[in-house]
Image: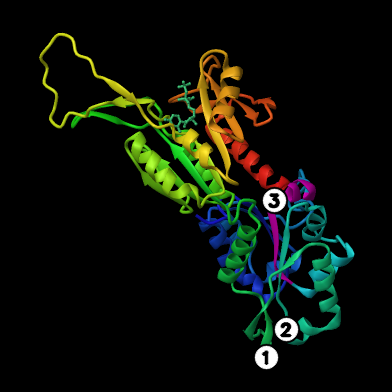
Amino acid sequence: MSVLNGKKILLGVSGGIAAYKTASLVRLFIKAGAHVQVIMTPASKDFVTPLTLSTLSKNPVHSSFFNQDDEDAVWNNHVDLALWADLMLIAPATSNTLSKMTTGNSDNLLVATYLSAKCPVYFAPAMDLDMYKHPSVLASFNALKSFGNIMIPAESGELASGLSGEGRMAEPENIIAFLEADLESKLPLKGKKILITAGPTYEAIDPVRFIGNHSSGKMGFDLANEAANLGAQVILVAGPTHYKAKNNLVEVIGVVSAQEMYDVCHEHFKDVDVAIAAAAVADYRPKVVATQKIKKAADEFSIELEKTKDILASLGAIKKNQFLIGFALETENEIENAKLKIQKKNLDLIVLNSLQDEGAGFKKETNKVTFIDQNFKIEPMELKSKESVAVDILNKVVSHFVKL
Ligand code: CTP
């Protein structure tokens, strides 16, 4: 999945021949899953039509401060547009527009919006080779870079003038690749490896029966997807569940029993920076697993159970620098029990679920959790979707690394 998926992109098109390439650019953004709004300078409309870009972006194109053809002229609020965006890209960026951006000459909607933008701004220059090297243009590049804007350098090749050299706007595919690489390199969990357990475990009684529980695995899969969205490489050790990972940075290793989950976790734990135990691991398993199906005979029947290994506690016992997060599902004395688990399992953070809270627990789309850290700082959270709880948990992971 592209890092551009779900991103809100404001594309500013200025008036150069390369504007015709923005049709492909918008199409590629949409294909990557981004939401696109386009602002055009008046001059750019001679090179590509607003209708083309509005059709491809699936949004009206903005080009003036208000619609002159409309009797009830509607003000195009450049501040709202700028605040909407996760990133702004000026492509093609002509020398005229670049110069206005450096001096703050906001005589068109594009530059006014640029001046209001708080998001990262990229610009892809396009001009003839001598213009591209002119000191005044180089001064614009430097000024914009000093403002924190990011330049996507022009490429070499045949130019509209018939001359050949540097100045062509980067090809749309290359602009996309540039943006993806830049955004990925800035993701807060880039380079981090995270182990996550999810779902129930099934403990065999005989070849056809098992002891299991109602865990759906959703919380663990949401955590894995969110961690991958933040750039982490994720190993998700999942008990039986129908969920699939949405992000290809998530490696799913399917297991069935608590012992298999234990073995896989121990194989990977030494290589990870973070481990999050979201699985509902069976605490007991049949002491003896029948090799044949158990036939119905006596009126009463009992199975002798033995304890499974506590995966989380075993990881806590050997942890070095890993940031270790566990869950606690409690029905009474919640805070006290959760604190005991932090100590017993040597955790950095526990995510407490109380079944007394409505909307929390198994088979629900929502969760209501309380964070308790190693110093017993207690932070109750609102009832929210499991995706949002996953975001909150990963924020804790991100702030742990920021503090280091
Ligand atoms: N856990 C684990 N391995 C087990 C049991 C639990 O890794 N064999 C992990 C769970 O994934 C969870 C945490 O331990 O992160 C706490 O699970 P919970 O069921 O609340 O607590 P238990 O330690 O099993 O204690 P109890 O059931 O007595 O409350």
Task: Report, in whole angstroms, how far the alpha carbon at label 3 lies from the one at label 2.
Answer: 30 Å
Q: Which mark is residue 233?
A: none
In the displayed orientation, state which residue is furthest to the front. 317
Question: Dot 2: what SS?
Answer: loop
Q: Between residues 275 and 287, which one lies in front from this camera angle?
A: 287
Residue type, numbered disc 2: Asp
Region in magenta: 78-93
Q: Residue furthest bottom?
A: 163
Q: Amino acid at mark 1?
A: Leu
- Nearer to us of marks 3 and 1 is 3
**Which is nearer the N-term, disc 1 or disc 2?**
2
Whether residue 182 appears in magenta in the rendering, the answer is: no
Q: Position of residue 334 (x, y in %)?
A: 57, 17
| Disc number placed over residue 163 in the picture, else none | 1
Left or right of 187? Residue 293 is left
Mark 3: C-beta under 8 Å from nearest atom of ligand 1: no
Mark 3 — residue?
85
Can residue 245 be seen in this snapshot?
Answer: no
**Residue tagged by mark 2?**
128
Cβ of mark 1 under 8 Å from ligand 1: the answer is no
**Do residues under tags 3 and 2 come within 8 Å of each other at their CB atoms?**
no
Q: Amino acid type of disc 3?
A: Ala
Is label 3 or label 2 in front? 3
Q: Is residue 95 left or right of residue 168?
A: right
Decide which of tag 3 and tag 2 comes sooner along the chain: 3
- Confirm or deny contact between disc 1 and disc 2 (CB under 8 A): yes
Q: Is residue 98 visible?
A: yes
Q: Residues within 10 Å of mark 1 (few under 14, many from 20)?
A: few
Identify the residue shown where x is 43% and y is 43%: 265
**Residue 169 coordinates in the image, percent (x, y):** 66, 75
Q: Callout 2: 10 Å neighbours few (<14), some, many (20+)?
A: many
